[in-house]
Image (cartoon, grey):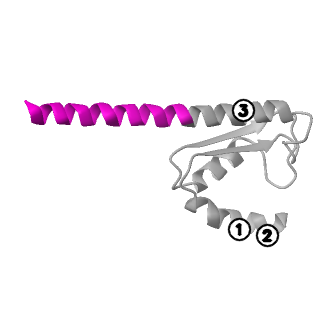
Amino acid sequence: MARSWIDTFPQLAPLIRVPVHYTLGEHERVWSPGPSALADIASLFTASPRVAVDEQAGGGDSLSIGLTSLAYHLKVLSSVEECVLAREEAEAAAAAEAAERQQGRAS
């Protein structure tokens, strides 16, 4: 499975249109960790409005169940919160802009 995923992933990543949080373990065995590898992965998500990449210190290839799982899951939840806040800010800005346009029409 992992071998075919390495070939398939670059074809699927550009189709993702939602925010992405991608984390590799420091001791990952399937993907190459490190800043340049993470930058390469991030560059594949061309349709995503937000891409965050991270390397989990001390983590292996099963971040959800390893010794660093708590730290990993806290980062995931933090990323979700950042996405929620960004969406709320965008919605508030759009509502303010619409109100200004409406007020301009009423004048």
**44 vs 94: above or below:** below
**3 vs 66: above or below:** below
Q: Nearer the viewer, mark 2 or mark 3?
A: 3
| Residue linked to disc 3 | 75
Residue 7 percent across, percent down from the top left: 73, 68
> Which quarter of the figure has residue 26?
top right
| Residue linked to disc 1 | 8
The N terminus appears in which quarter of the rendering? Answer: bottom right
Residue 84 falls left or right of residue 26 = left
- Give the residue at the far left of this rendering: 107
Q: Are marks 1 and 2 in contact (CB under 8 Å)?
A: yes
Mark 2 residue type: Ser
Residue closer to the observer: 88 or 3: 88
Residue closer to the observer: 16 or 3: 16
Real-space Cα separation, disc 1 to disc 2, in angstroms: 6 Å
| Residue linked to disc 2 | 4
Mark 1 residue type: Thr
Mark 3 crowd level (few <14, some 14–19, many ≥20, 10 Å Cα): some
Residue range (magenta): 84-107
Real-space Cα separation, disc 2 to disc 3, in angstroms: 28 Å
Q: Residue at x 83, y 31 (%)?
A: 70
Residue closer to the observer: 63 or 92: 92
